[in-house]
Image (cartoon, helix red, strand yellow):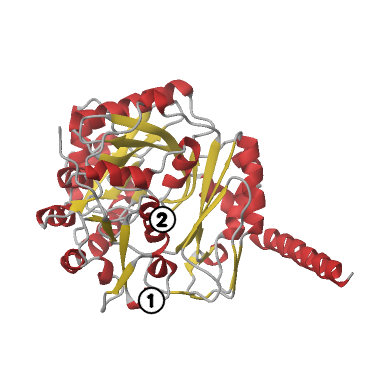
């Protein structure tokens, strides 16, 4: 039996809404928290919610990446563990290993698994060995354009180029014909080198009109592995997720079962610990292919929590302590549907240009089945240094039609003024007939955006808001 190490104090190595999320989970477990913040985040909500908070001076991004400094602070403040959240250091194996070497608990997977799945080629090779379907493609990172072109010719067009040492849509290009290859290869290579330090890419067969389905898994230190169902993350823009759904409203039940079986079996065989997400593409013929694994908490974990009732962040902490899973697979039940909408400070009518500046008005929705994870408030100033996501709206209901109706209502209640956001786009999506009928693939945004009248959608909503305000004012005069 592995010994338990009680966690009494956690340093949260992150910022924004996910830092708040982790702090809340810790408070419910009776665990003290330490926050870190850059000068740009001095007035952030999470800084006030933590038991202690410490300024990291200097570059506002490096504040969350300098892990020597972060670990030193954790030791100075007598923390037992560090939770990395997502982004920043969350999938850095050197950070995880350093945390452990310094006698602290890393709340997440083992460093060797972070390293394995952070290397896309090694991950594909490993999954192939385990019998998991993968797309035809290169077996190693490629920097030589002639070698890359030869592999593309062998696979057959269309192909997709992906940065071998990074993700998030950077260094990714779709090549539909041979005449485009050289230009797009150089473009992908240069972008990958700029963002990840290495320009090497790998090549895969490109799947037309796929759905992006991911499986949430959870595993303890004793070889127990369970899945917490799937999420449909097909609605994306430039490979960045916008809307996430649990469970998928249209996934074939037999394919669902096989995805679950494949994910759990693979993670059991590699001896995985803590939480992780296996991502797959499902083609038009219901064939599925592994594309990558995220060895961290996902942005969209909220929808899985809503349909299962399991607090994923708290389970991460308890697994890190050495506690066995509290439930068997058959005890994991999924009820209803949940949808998460990423509310981003960006202007869909200006090619999604990022928005920075003062929020002059802010009102988040509420009511049954509505959850908001946010990092902003009225008079908050959005800094220019970080990801554009400022809030996540998640809604739950028993049926698909009910959850879409609830999403419409909640999105209409959501008010953010002072900076442009993607709320007009989200409101258009939930009113779209194809979305309501569950007809969407990874091409959904590209195909639908030109037909959405975002200005008209917002004018109708603003007119309704003014009418309601006038009615309330008239009532108070009576």
Q: Position of residue 344 (x, y in %)?
A: 49, 61
Q: Residue at x 42, y 53 (%)?
A: 238
- Label 1 crowd bin: few (<14), some (14–19), many (20+), radius 10 Å: some
Q: How many marks?
A: 2
Q: Position of residue 365 (x, y in %)?
A: 61, 57
Q: Does residue 289 lie above or below 97 as drawn?
A: above
Most distant residue in the right direction? 478
Q: Position of residue 49 (x, y in %)?
A: 41, 65
Element at label 1: loop
Classify residue 442 as left or right of residue 60: right
Classify residue 25 as left or right of residue 269: right
Q: Quadrant of residue 471?
A: bottom right
Residue 151 visible to the viewer: yes
Viewport quadrant of the C terminus? bottom right
Q: Nearer the viewer, mark 2 or mark 1?
A: 2
In front of the other: 2 or 208: 2
Q: CA distance from mark 2 to mark 1?
A: 19 Å
User: Which mark, by number, is residue 24?
Assistant: 2
- Label 2 crowd bin: few (<14), some (14–19), many (20+), radius 10 Å: some
Element at label 2: helix
Q: Does residue 304 lie above or below 196 as drawn?
A: above
Q: Residue at x 55, y 34 (%)?
A: 336
User: Which mark, by number, is residue 42?
Assistant: 1
Q: Position of residue 173 (x, y in %)?
A: 34, 51
Q: Quadrant of residue 434?
A: top right
In front of the other: 44 or 229: 44
Classify residue 235 as left or right of residue 264: right
Q: Residue at x 63, y 52 (%)?
A: 410
Q: Quadrant of residue 262?
A: top left
């Amino acid at each position: 039996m592995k010994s338990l190490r009680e966690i009494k104090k956690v340093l949260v190595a992150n910022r924004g809404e996910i830092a708040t999320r982790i702090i809340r989970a810790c408070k419910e477990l009776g665990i003290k928290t330490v926050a870190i913040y850059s000068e740009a985040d001095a007035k952030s909500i999470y800084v006030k919610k933590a038991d202690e908070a410490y300024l990291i001076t200097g570059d506002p991004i490096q504040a969350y990446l300098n892990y020597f400094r972060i670990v030193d602070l954790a030791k100075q403040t007598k923390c037992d563990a560090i939770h990395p959240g997502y982004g920043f250091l969350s999938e850095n194996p050197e950070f995880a290993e350093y945390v452990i070497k310094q006698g602290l608990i890393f709340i997440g997977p083992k460093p060797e698994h972070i390293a394995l799945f952070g290397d896309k080629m090694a991950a594909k090779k490993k999954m192939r060995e385990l019998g998991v379907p993968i797309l035809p493609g290169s077996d190693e990172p490629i920097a030589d354009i002639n070698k890359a072109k030869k592999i593309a010719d062998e696979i057959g067009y269309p192909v997709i180029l992906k940065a071998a040492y990074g993700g998030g849509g950077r260094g990714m290009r779709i090549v539909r014909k041979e005449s485009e290859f050289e230009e797009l290869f150089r473009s992908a290579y240069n972008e990958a080198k700029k963002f990840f330090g290495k320009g090497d890419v790998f090549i895969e067969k490109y799947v037309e009109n796929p759905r992006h389905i991911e499986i949430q898994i959870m595993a303890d230190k004793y070889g127990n592995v369970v899945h917490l169902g799937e999420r449909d993350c097909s609605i994306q823009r430039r490979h960045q997720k916008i809307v996430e759904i649990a469970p998928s409203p249209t996934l074939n039940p037999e394919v669902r079962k096989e995805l679950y079986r494949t994910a759990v079996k693979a993670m059991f065989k590699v001896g995985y610990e803590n939480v992780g997400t296996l991502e797959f593409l499902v083609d038009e013929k219901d064939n599925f292919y592994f594309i990558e694994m995220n060895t961290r908490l996902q942005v969209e974990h909220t929808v899985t929590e809503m349909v299962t009732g399991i607090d994923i962040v708290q389970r991460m902490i308890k697994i890190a302590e050495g506690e066995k899973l509290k439930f068997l697979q058959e005890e994991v039940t999924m009820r209803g549907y949940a949808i998460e909408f990423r509310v981003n400070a960006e202007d869909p009518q200006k090619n999604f240009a990022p928005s920075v500046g003062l929020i002059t008005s802010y009102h988040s929705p509420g009511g049954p089945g509505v959850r908001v994870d946010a990092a902003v408030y009225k008079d908050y100033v959005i800094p220019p240094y970080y990801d554009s996501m400022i809030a996540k709206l998640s809604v739950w209901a028993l049926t698909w039609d009910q959850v879409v109706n609830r999403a419409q209502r909640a999105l209409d209640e959501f008010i953010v003024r002072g900076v442009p956001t993607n709320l007009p786009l989200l409101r258009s999506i939930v009113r779209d007939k194809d979305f309501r009928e569950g007809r969407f693939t990874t091409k959904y945004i590209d195909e639908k955006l030109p037909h959405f009248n975002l200005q008209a959608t917002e004018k109708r909503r603003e007119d309704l808001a003014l009418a309601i305000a006038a009615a309330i004012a008239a009532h108070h005069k009576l």
